[in-house]
Structures are given as structure tokens and as C-alpha cells.
Amino acid sequence: MNKTLYVRTLSGIALLIVVLGTVLWSPYSMLALGVFLTAGIMREFYRIGRLTGARPLTTYPIVVGAAIVVLAFLIKTGTLAPVCLAAALPAVFVLFIAELYRKQPSPLTNIAWEIAGIVYAAVPMALFVTLPVAVRGAAIDYSPAVLLSILFIVWANDVGAYLFGVAFGRRKLFERISPNKSWEGFFGGVACAVGVGMLVALWQDASVPAWAGAGGIVAVTGVFGDLVESMFKRSVGIKDSGNILPGHGGFLDRFDALILALPFVYTYFSIIFTL
């Protein structure tokens, strides 16, 4: 095993342990993970923005994004009333006021990047921290099985796409954005994601068709998440969004699929479980 692969494997195992450990430990450790990921993803997103020539604020939008994640969690647990989420609206519009005093040449571009960062990172992470939480009477019912299942499906899609792509990849999936991705890898990833979805359905004694559908949705939207992040990086000529994860790059590089998959699979489950 060469040194690069060795480092990548070790850091991947460490990341897996941290993510699984914090999700399993308690709802509050899971919340801390969600806030941490929000901040890390937004920081890298704004770094990309600055490489385009824009000058978005960094600290304040990150605070707003993290606050939205915390508010979503507190509302889901019944600690705060849903109306409290309205506090995010004036907090976002402060970004417009701030540009009046910054004297930057492209205020609209800066505001666009700032708001895009909040939507791109905070909204999926708000879903991340609320998915396993429910209120039963006066107690918080924390059931991380669904969130863990989605994470397993995302990882299965990544691994399946890589292995099938290496073994059978011939036809390019989206060469302009990601030359190494192939249709063979894509379908291999979908097959693995659907298969793991069916397995977690058996684990949870849940509907196999529903979870097979979730696997397909996560696989397809996860690929788009990867492609969107590749588009961001390619537009500014960088390989990785950051270097905090040895062998893996940054938070965006590791969680790009989850970012785009969460809103779709959350909506999917919200619909099928209320029919």
C-alpha cells in the first residue's frame, strides 16, 4: 500500500469513527457535529468564492448558518416554538445592509455568495440534525437509525461507484466537469445504494420498497452533489476544497454527496410516511 493510500485509509477510518460515534452518542453530540460540519463546509465554500474574485463575508454568515441548524434542532425537540425560526430572516437581510459599509466593487456578487453558502450548507445540516429527533410527551425521542442508514447508503454509493468505475468504466458520465466518472460507475453505485437500502429496511423491519427507493434517490442526488462540488472547484482551478482531512481534502470533498442528497431524501420520507 503506497503512502497516499495508507494516509487516506487511516483518515477515512478516523472520520468514520468520529461521525458514527457522535451520531450514536446523543442528540447533542449529533447537533455539535452538524454545527461543526456547517461551519467547515461554509468556510470552504466562501474560500472558493474568494478565488473567483468575490469578497463575501465569512464569519457572520457562518454564525447565521450555525444558528439556523441549532434553531431547527431546538424547534424539532419542542424547546422553541416554530416561529423562532423567523429570526433567521432579519439575520440574513443584515448581509444586504453590511454591504453598504464594506465599499466593495461587487456587492451583489458578495451577497449572492453569502446567501448561497447558507442555503447550500445550513439547510441540509438542519435536516441532518432534525431527522433522528422526535418529541414523545415531555421527552426527546432520539432514534439515529434512519440517519445512520442514509449515511450507509451514501457511503455504499461512493464505494460502489468507485469500484465499478475502476473495474468497468468506459463511457464518461460528465466529462466536462468530472472526467474520471463513468456511467458504469454510476450504475454500480446505484445498485450498491439500492442494495444497502434494502438491507437497512430489513435491519429496521421497515418497508423494503420504500428504502430501496431511498437508496435510488440518495445515489442519483449524491452523484449530482459530487458533480456540483466538482463544478465549483473546476471553476477556480483547485483539486480539493480544503486540506483538513488527509487524503480526502476538505469537508466539501467528503460530504458533497450528503449535502445534496439530504433535502431530497428528507422530502421523500416526509411524503411517503404521511400517505
Image: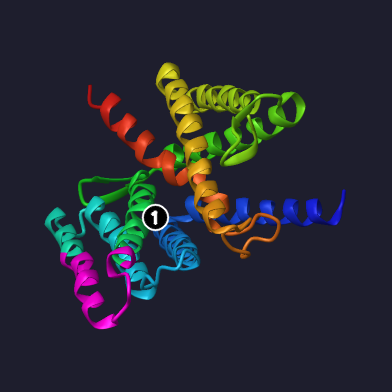
| Identity of the residue drawn at 35% across and 44% down | 131
Which sits in the foreground, 242 or 70?
242
Question: In the image shown, does 82 or 252 lie closer to the viewer?
Answer: 252
- Give the residue number, with chain letter if any, for mark 1: 121
Q: Where's residue 4, x and y in %?
A: 80, 55
Region in magenta: 90-110
Quarter of the view holding residue 111: bottom left
Task: Count how many numbered circles sit on residues in the image.
Answer: 1
Is 272 left, or right, of 143 in this rendering? Answer: left
User: x, y percentage for residue 32?
Assistant: 43, 63
Q: Secondary structure at mark 1?
A: helix
Q: Is residue 144 left or right of residue 66?
A: right
Residue 167 vs 15, above or below: the answer is: above
Q: Quadrant of residue 260?
A: top left
Q: Is residue 79 above or below residue 272?
A: below
Nearer to me, 143 or 96: 96
| Residue 163 lies in the magenta stretch | no
Furthest residue to the right?
A: 1
Percent coordinates x, y for residue 144 in the rendering: 43, 43
Quadrant in the picture for residue 99: bottom left
Q: Residue at x 63, y 58 (%)?
A: 249
Helix, strand or loop: magenta stretch: helix
Q: Is residue 69 left or right of residue 241?
A: left
Mark yes or no: residue 199 visible.
yes
Above/below status of 104 relative to 242: below
Give the residue type that dot 1 points to.
Ala
